[in-house]
Amino acid sequence: MSNQPKLGECLRALRRRHGWTLQDVNQRTGVAVSTLSKVENDQMSLTYDKLLQISEGLGINLAELLAPPTGSETALARRSISRPGEGLLQVTPNYDYLYLCTELQRKRMVPVVARVKVRDIAEFGPLVRHSGEEFIYVLEGAIVVHTDHYAPVRLEKGGSIYIDSTMGHAYISVGEGDATIIGVCSSPEPDLEGTLRSLFAT
């Protein structure tokens, strides 16, 4: 009998490593929950096209999808520490971004500290849109948050906002000096940090 792991075992192990439910995989790949369940229970196989659809939807390559179980189904033990002043700095006309914990790839959340320099929405340019959601907390100064669908709102130090990032949005500094905010962006997109960095590149 072959010792090669079956596709169902590989898929189940992959889900458990990432903490995904069958519904999570369905939402990311478009493959029906019933199909995924049958695959995991060795009741059906998948065509190459379907395998590609799953791997691309999950942001992994086929080799990772078909990797044999490691024997340990515990959660990934990843961690990253950013010391004061550490991170990847990206300077743009509107904000100076300091991306934190950048050595971790495929993070589900992207933490960033930003200095808000722009002081007039007319100078900001088009509102920013990207996949996912984001949380913003004002560390210093004051900002006005502009978004689609809602009136602008002013946030002082200690104020926060949570938005759907697919809405157009912009943060404008309105205090005496530049405002400093911390933001956490989240998305099922496998390389959200890379997308954000390209989106804001000048």
Image (cartoon, rainbow, N blue to C red):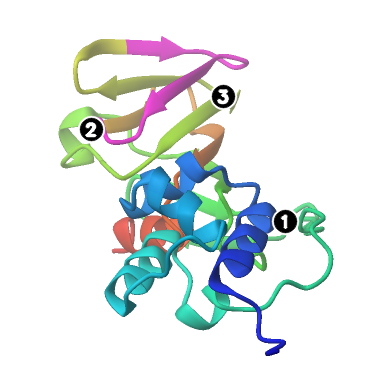
* Residue 93 seen in this snapshot: yes
Q: Which residue appears at 57% of the width and 25% of the height?
A: 137
The quadrant of the rendering that contains the C terminus is: bottom left
Q: Which residue is mark 1?
A: 85
Mark 1 or 2 closer to N-term? 1
Answer left or right for 75 relative to 124: right
Q: Which residue is mark 3?
A: 138
Answer left or right for 47 relative to 13: left
Question: Which quarter of the figure has residue 146?
Answer: top left
Q: Residue furthest front?
A: 1
Q: Is residue 155 magenta?
A: yes
SS for tag 3?
strand
Instruction: Give how far apart the Cα atoms at labels 1 and 3 are.
Output: 18 Å
Q: Which residue is mark 2?
A: 168
Q: Residue 187's spot in the image, x, y percent? A: 44, 45
Q: How many C-alpha atoms fall within 10 Å of the one at disc 2: few (<14), some, or many (≥20)?
A: some
Q: Nearer the viewer, mark 1 or mark 2?
A: 2
Question: Which quarter of the figure has residue 180?
Answer: top right
Q: Amino acid at mark 2?
A: Gly
Q: How many C-alpha atoms fall within 10 Å of the one at disc 3: few (<14), some, or many (≥20)?
A: many
SS for tag 1?
loop
Q: Which residue appears at 55% of the width and 58% of the height?
A: 40
Q: Residue 171's spot in the image, x, y percent? A: 36, 30
Instruction: Give how far apart the Cα atoms at labels 2 and 3 are.
Output: 19 Å
Q: Amino acid at mark 1?
A: Gly
The boundaries of the magenta stretch are: 153-168
Q: Are marks 1 and 3 in contact (CB under 8 Å)?
A: no
